[in-house]
Amino acid sequence: MYVGGYGTGGRVLYDNVAPWVAPSDPMNYLIFSTGPVTGTATPIAGRYTVVTKSPMTGFFGDASSGGFWGAELKFSGYDMVVIVGRAPKPTLLVIRDGGAELKSAELYWGMNAREADQAIRSDLGDRAIKVAVIGQAGERLVRYAAIMNDNAERTAARCGVGAVMGSKMLKAVAVRGHGKVHVADPERLNTLAKEITQTVKTNPLCQHFSKVGTAGDFAFLFSLGDTPAYNWSKGDFGGEGDPGVEKLDISKVLVGTRTCYICPYLCRRVVKVNGREVEGPEYEAVAALGSNCGIDDIDVVCKMNDLCNLYGLDVISTGCTLAFAMECYERGIITSEDTDGIDLKFGNAEAAIEMIHRIAKREGFGNVLAEGTRAASMLIGRGSEKYAIHVKGLEIAMHDPRAIQAMGPHYACTPTGGRHTEGLTLGFEIGRLKSDLPLPPIKDRFQTEGKGLLAKIVEDWRAFQNASGWCAFSDRGAYGGQLKFLNVFAAVTGWQLKLNEALLIGERIFNLKKCFNVKHGCPASEDRLPERLLTEKGKAGTVCKLHETLPEYYRVRGWDPKLSKPTKEKLEELGLHDIANDLYQR
């Protein structure tokens, strides 16, 4: 019913975490979950997902990561790891070929994520072991702390999953396996895998992605008005003609590329920071730490990105929280007395770097910003709430719903807050992605008619993808549409799904997450966007017309518009009879 990923993980969370359990409570669950295609010969599918109750929102939280950790967990004999309770001292979980052991991590506590990863592999005597680890931000319960893996180069970033891991005194989970993931039809899977790999080598869209990665699309997305600047307040970046955009061209500092498990893309960027080759920033980091903070130096953004990786911080929430504080500083809501003497103006790179250090260590004003934008605005007061750009407490990702109208209802209603990975509609709205999905007619990205339905369909597909273990970038031409995904899924599982059946599974999973929120007290008033996005025109020249798209979204979702709650009939239609009884008999 739930396939894997945050589907099966979400059901475990729903069944076992009561509404009165706080995110940092020992009885909160921390779940590492893979999908059925993870660890197989399936290309572009090396993902694992972390599921928990989020410290950022108090509702459903999940974060996904690539690299090699997820596949290694499958090789060790497990699909999922469920962690509950709190250790009395810093602890390391080691999983090897079906066995699990808890060991002391006191030697690693206080290390950054990269230091701890390398020390753990050295001490365990196995350089090939894969480590998922928190840095100092997770140890200090920074609300948007991340979990890093593969030498602190890949990250399960959003929703504060690293803070939950830190609250359990769990420094790291190290996995190593020599097993094989068995599939239903190996010959068919190998044939399909070769076809997909060949497509990546020949398809212009795939080749472009391999060449530039996500960060290489920064200038294009900014030209669409999709990228925020100065805390989502201005249409330009650096003055008329956006001179700051060219200064954030990552090709100027690129020294190499990397890839993830069984992935023919080379989308990961490698740059130099302090003379060392490290993982470079993705598009989200360039926008969040760069343009949204008014910083136009790609070398500085690379350094900020690496600091976030070392400390274990979500770059989106870090950048957005800094941008919020910078606008408050520029407007006089906070002063240098509040910021420990730091001149926190837009574009001040030294101030931004210093504040990242202070956030991760919870020092001075960094202790306030470590709470995230919503909580920080409540602590600051003085009208600062107006400039806190978040949904449900989670900072919005770097895609502007004023430029892509279907992102309005998506951001407002996705259960985990301001996320883009659960339903980014951009590629469909500008006609860049080939699709077999039953999408409504799309005239352009500014129309509002049909955009509630578009958001719903894309969300359902993404939910199926994630639960299965695919990377979201697998949609970028490699599979040529959704039907080949289902053929690969059948080769792995023996289950030949039709497209409407896959979408139904995705819809079930999406509603499962929504039901967790309802059960845990999330009101309809949380389905909203920051006022700025609804009233101030962005670079695209318009506002987000949520009032036009939200009613349609509720209708096609089968949610009560007054309660923002799935109807009992909708839940029963999805096979969630026990959850329907749970929510409607309370």
Image: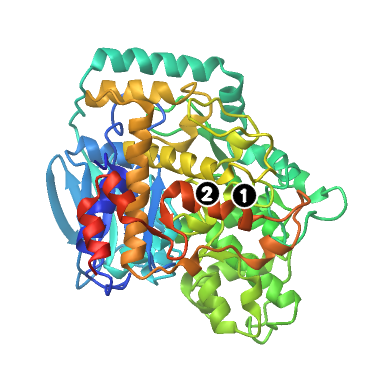
Give the residue displayed 49% in from the left and 21% down from the top. Answer: 480
Q: Relative to 538, say whether 259 is above or below.
A: above
Report the disc number at residue 477.
Answer: none
Picture coordinates of residue 61 (x, y %)?
Answer: 38, 58
Picture coordinates of residue 291 (x, y %)?
Answer: 70, 55
Q: Image check: 42 left or right of 372? A: left
Picture coordinates of residue 521 (x, y %)?
Answer: 36, 71
Q: CA distance from mark 1 to mark 2?
A: 7 Å
Give the residue displayed 43% in from the left and 28% down from the top. Answer: 263
Dot 2: few (<14), some (14–19), or many (≥20) neighbours within 10 Å? some
- Quarter of the C terminus within the rendering: bottom left
Q: Relative to 39, say whether 16 is above or below.
A: below
How is colour applied across the structure in the image? rainbow
Q: Are marks 1 and 2 in contact (CB under 8 Å)?
A: yes
Q: Could you say which is closer to the camera, residue 390 or residue 164?
A: 390
Most extreme residue toward the front, as rendered? 569
| Disc 2, SS | loop
Give the residue displayed 63% in from the left and 81% down from the top. Answer: 339
Q: Which residue is mark 1?
A: 399
Q: Amino acid at mark 2?
A: His
Q: Amino acid at mark 1?
A: His
Asked if residue 533 can be seen in this view, the reply is yes
Quadrant of residue 316 within the rendered picture? bottom right
Q: Which residue is mark 2?
A: 420
Give the residue displayed 53% in from the left and 33% down from the top. Answer: 439
Asked if residue 469 can be seen in this view, the reply is no
Picture coordinates of residue 447 (x, y %)?
Answer: 68, 43
Q: Could you say which is closer to the camera, residue 389 or residue 560?
A: 560
Dot 1: few (<14), some (14–19), or many (≥20) neighbours within 10 Å? many
Q: Relative to 329, say whether 165 is above or below.
A: above
Most extreme residue toward the left, as rendered? 99
